[in-house]
Each structure stands twice: as structure tokens, then as C-alpha cells.
Image (spheres, rainbow, N blue to C red):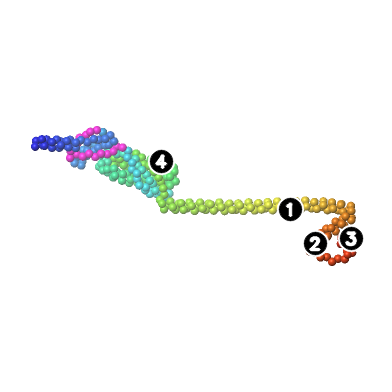
Amino acid sequence: MKKNALIIGGVIAIVIISSSMFTVHMTQNAVVLELSKPKEIITEPGLYFKIPFIQKVRYFSKQLLDNDSNPTEVITKDKKNLLVDNFTMFRIVDPLKFLETVRGERSARARLDDIIYSELRVEIGTHDLHDVVTETRDSIMAKVTKEANVKAAEYGIEVVEVRIKRTDLPPEVANSIFNRMRTERERIAMEYRSEGKEEATKIRAETDKEKTILVAQAYKQEQIVRGEGDAQATKIYADAYSKDQKFYTFMRSMEAYKKSLKTDTTLLMSEDSDFLGFLNKSK
């Protein structure tokens, strides 16, 4: 019995000693609670002791934490709805105040979402959509970070940085803008096509005009050359015929025969006809 009692006593002692010790890691802060009331704040790493069953320890990270918020809708100065997707980098700098106000990280993240959204809505509301998307984003984020850090300090939180991951238009607004852009592009395309057709018509008309002029000039040149050739041929014929009158009469008669006497032609003439003079052997 005595031996059993010693064993039981030893086990109880080990349990009590182990439950009275706790370790604080270098990445943590700890708050010792006695009957749910803060008793001690520990910021240095090491092995510590507490009263078993009376005191409890809550641990809080010293590391930089992130909070990825859900996209929220804000209104710009020029009354444009904008969908903002942001994230926040923060750390717990006052574990006691953090414990007394928000209790844990889940509640802290929800509170940060409210603070950041409020500051974003106020700050973006003083800028036009174009500025938010292009020029002033960094300055907006710097101011939101500063103002959010002031409000988050009430909860023992330091806001290190607030950043926008993505900005977009709400689906219904985006569809409307895209449709308007599509309509505008179609209008511009129609203008280009209309201008192209007008230019093509001008080019065709100018080309037809040039073609008509060139054809007329070519025809004129052709008639001049042909006239000169005919005149020269007539002169040559006249000179040749004037040298031999009988040869001229013979050639003219041959041309008349060629044009008049065809295989399907029947002529009734007198044998003494001058027209048949060169065909009549008696002549």
C-alpha cells in the first residue's frame, strides 16, 4: 500500500509540475490569466511557471500576419462603382489590449475588415476612377494604411501595409461598359468602311477618267496614222496608175470582179458589156 501510495503521489507530482510549466517561443507573446483575469504579460522566449488549474496562458504571434479580405464595392468621386480586392499585413503589438478587445485572430480579422473597408470607401470616394486605377493608387494605399493603423491601435494591432490586389468593375457595370465600347468600335469601323468605299469610288472614277482619256488619245493617234497611211497609199496607187492607164483599168476591173462575181451570184449581161471586157477573149 505504501509503495502504491508513493507511485500515485509521484504521478500526481509529475502532473502538477508539468502543468505548472509552459514555454514561450521566440515568435510568440504570452498573457498569463488568473481566474480569467490578466496576471502577467511575457514577451521574452523561455521556460516559465504558473499555478496549475488557477492560471492559464494565452499565446499571441509576434510574426507579421496577413488578412485577405473579400472584394468590396466602393464608389469613386465621379460616381463610378468599383470592386476592390485588398489584403492587409498586420501584427499584434499589445497582446493584453488585443485579448481584452478582440480576444482572438478571427475577431481581429473581422474588425480589420470593417476598418479597412471604411477607410477605403472614404479615401477612394475623393478620387476619380481613372486616378484610382492608374496614378494615385500608391498614395491612396499609404493614407489608408496610416488611418487604419491609428484605429487598429485601439485593439493592440499595428497595420503595416494595406494593398489592393485587383480592382474591377461590378459585373453589371462592366457588361454595360463593354457593350458601349463594342457599339463605339462598331461605329468607328462603319465610318472607316464608309470612308474606304468613298475613296474606292473616287479612285475608280479617276481611273475610268484616265482610261477614257488614254483610249481617246490612242484612237486619235490611230486615226492620224491611218489617215497618213491611207493618203500615202493613195498617192502610191495614183502614181502607179498614172504611169499605165491600161494597168489601172485592169486592176479596177479585177477588184470589181472580186466583189461582184461570187459562187452564189448570177449575173445576166450582154456579151458586149464593158464590164466583161477582160473576160471576153474576143476583146
Q: What element carries label 1?
A: helix
> Are the residues at dot 1 and dot 3 in contact (C-beta closer than 8 Å)?
no
Image quadrant in which the C terminus is located: bottom right
Residue 262 is marked as: 2
Say which quarter of the image contains residue 260.
Answer: bottom right
- Which numbered disc, 3 or 4, marks the residue that appears first in the sequence? 4
Which one is nearer the viewer's eye here, 283 or 79?
283
In the current view of this chain or complex, which residue is farthest to the front?
281
Q: Left or right? Give the position of 149 relative to 270.
A: left
Q: How far apart are marks 1 and 2 (CA)?
A: 35 Å
Residue of label 4:
138
Query: What type of secondary structure mainly makes up the magenta span?
Result: strand
Q: What residue type is labelled 1?
A: Tyr
The spot of residue 142 in percent (x, y) is 38, 40
For the point 9% across and 35% down, which residue is it?
2
- Relative to 235, residue 136 above or below: above
- Which numbered disc, 2 or 3, marks the residue that appears first in the sequence? 2
Residue of label 1:
219
Q: Distance between the residues labelled 4 and 2?
A: 106 Å
For the point 44% across and 42% down, which residue is it?
135
- Which numbered disc, 1 or 3, marks the residue that appears first in the sequence? 1
Is residue 126 at least partly visible in the picture?
A: no
> Are the residues at dot 1 and dot 4 in contact (C-beta closer than 8 Å)?
no
Q: Which amino acid does label 2 sit on?
A: Lys
Q: Is mark 4 on a helix, strand or loop?
A: helix
Residue 281 is marked as: 3
Q: What stretch is highlighted in magenta?
A: 46-63
